[in-house]
Amino acid sequence: MKKVALLFPGQGSQMAGMGKWFYDHYPIAKRTFEEADDTLGWSVTNACFHGPIDQLTSTDVAQPALLTASMAMYRVYREEIGVHPFAAAGHSLGEYSALCGAGAISFAEALELVHFRGQTMKAASELGTGTMLAVGGIDYLTAEEQLATLTASREEACIACYNGPFQAVVSGTYPAMERVESHFRKLGAKVTHLQVGAPFHHPLMQSAAEELKRRLEQVAFKTLHYKVLSNVTGHAIDANKQSLVEELTRQMTLPVQWHKSMNVLHYWGIELAIELGPKTVLKQLLKSHEAIDAFAYDVAEDRKRLASRIANRTGEASRSDHPIAKLVAIAVTEPNRRPDDPKARQGVVEPYKRLIDLRGRLEQQNKQPGPEDIHQGLQWLQAILQMKGVPPEQQRNRLAEANLI
């Protein structure tokens, strides 16, 4: 059986009409929307189907609406496809959908939590209004450097989401974001305004985070049925109550490590990733991971293609078995033990780029690495691990995981 990961989108993916096709064609989806209406006491269904978009942009409406659309699709997926996932990941708000699907919280509990979360975030944004911009076409290290020259601190503007090697989201106050937008456009970056009503994953959300933590401490979290990746670290969440409370609290003011999470899925050998929610944002962000075949369950053609892939259990082996791909995954997933050392951070960049280039060249040529390629790759990985402060014994263990020693 192929390894499957489920992906759940966050705010910004909402759209009028989301989930309606599933509502019209599957009783389980219709019951999901009805449960949301009954739980919250207002028509989540009407908001999802009819908007208008300015209402769906308001975070207190958008969050329960997106959760409902995602869980309706998840329940249809479970009925129609039925493959138990190896892991799940949710982008920002989507982390609640992922945890709900994995059994940590019930759908009703998740609805109440995200509605409360949306209300607190909306209140916080009204105290110090701001916005978010997607910045594409430049690598995120350059984006960080440029932000440092434009702003005095994270309180003005900061990276809110590391979505991919050349895709980041910046969050900040309106005055700072005007400077950021103008500057990045001059650099040739593609800058897009997101459909959000507040600067998420930013220090302006601290008051909302504190309120949310008090609410989260009242929740009786249950055992996860499968792994769920953390927005804060990019790695699997520790499945205990205190860890979950801290994760969902810190997520409010810290950046989403989505790119790192996708690299972890690659390292685990995930072959199929299924986006459960409106639009195709997360599917598009996986384009840099050719080893993972991504599907958007909201797209009819993708549903047909997914059913075909699930039925065909004898397809070609996953490229995640590629030795250089494993080296890249190790380089990404090993935590940096010297996070405050700028030399360590810069020292990782060049060997990592060389590994990425080597992997891409070999995969494009459909070639296995030769002895020289493996030797060079090991040297670059060794340099990365050393710069990250990884102890020698742990370095040997990580290389052993790739079956290279």
Image: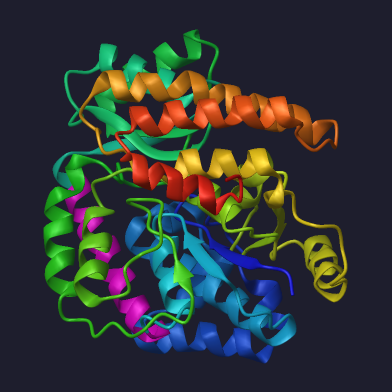
Task: State the image coordinates of residue 384 (x, y, percent, origin top left).
Answer: 43, 29
Please identify the quadrant where the N terminus is shown. Answer: bottom right
Query: Residue at coordinates 36% horizontally, 82% vertically from top-left?
Result: 105
Task: State the image coordinates of residue 52 (x, y, percent, origin top left).
Answer: 51, 58
Q: Is residue 55 above or below residue 166?
A: below
Query: Residue at coordinates 58% horizontally, 49% vertically from top-left?
Result: 402
Along the viewing direction, whichever of 272 and 64 lies nearer the viewer: 272
Let me know if residue 143 appears in the view: no
Task: State the image coordinates of residue 50 (x, y, percent, origin top left).
Answer: 56, 66
What range is drawn magenta here? 106-125
Q: Is residue 167 above or below residue 119?
A: above
Q: Is residue 332 above or below residue 152?
A: below
Does the magenta-highlighted stretch encompass residue 268? no
Along the viewing direction, whichever of 334 and 215 lies nearer the viewer: 334
Query: Residue at coordinates 47% horizontally, 82% vertically from top-left?
Result: 225
Let me know if residue 183 appears in the view: yes
Task: State the predominant SS element of the stretch in magenta.
Answer: helix
Name the image quarter holding residue 144: top left
Query: Residue at coordinates 17% horizontally, 57% vertically from top-left?
Result: 209
From the viewer's perspective, tell me whether residue 172 is left or right of residue 194: left
Does the magenta-highlighted stretch encompass residue 107? yes
Name the image quarter holding residue 127: top left
From the viewer's perspective, tell me whether residue 358 is left or right of residue 14: right
Task: State the image coordinates of residue 54 (x, y, percent, origin top left).
Answer: 44, 52
